[in-house]
Image (spheres, rainbow, N blue to C red):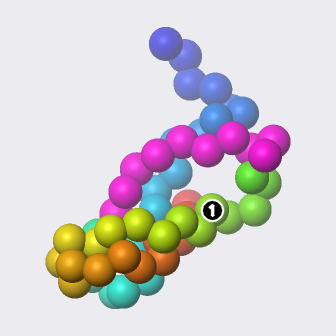
């Protein structure tokens, strides 16, 4: 399966400062800006914001 530039793989890093990351893909047409999702960080055991890192 070839990599597609329309759906790049991005790392989501926790804003809690724990260094925990999620890896996902995003659609550049729908989300041209940096992605911000609220997800669970197991090291602080809370839902926090995860921001896209390049």
Location of residue 34 in the rendering, given as x and y in whole percent from the top left corner? 67, 64
- Relative placement, left or right, of 4 versus 15 is right
Residue positioned 52% across, 51% down in the render = 10
Of the 4 image quadrants, the one containing the C terminus is bottom right
In the image, residue 40 lies in the stretch drawn in magenta? no
Q: Which residues are magenta?
A: 21-30
Going by the picture, which residue comes out furthest to the front?
46
Residue 53 percent across, percent down from the top left: 53, 65
Q: Relative to residue 53, is residue 31 drawn left or right?
A: right
Where, by quadrant of the figure, is residue 5 drawn?
Answer: top right
Residue at image location 48% in from the left, 70% down from the top: 38
Give the vertical position of 41 relative to 8 (above or below): below
Disc 1 residue crowd, few under 14, some 14–19, many 20+, Cα 10 Å = some
Vertical relation: 6 (above or below) 41: above
Rendered residue at 46%/62% (across/down): 12
Q: Is residue 38 left or right of residue 27?
A: left
- On screen, residue 17 above or below 42: below
Residue denoted by label 1: 35
Q: Secondary structure at mark 1?
A: loop
Question: In percent of the image, x 48 and y 77: which residue is there?
Answer: 49
Residue 28 is one of the magenta-drawn residues: yes
Can see residue 3? yes
Q: Is residue 20 above or below residue 10?
A: below
């Amino acid at each position: 399966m070839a990599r597609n530039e329309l759906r790049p793989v991005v790392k989501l890093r926790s804003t809690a400062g724990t260094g925990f990351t999620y890896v996902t893909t995003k659609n550049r047409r729908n989300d041209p800006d940096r992605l911000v999702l609220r997800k669970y960080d197991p090291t602080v055991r809370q839902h926090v914001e995860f921001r896209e890192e390049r």
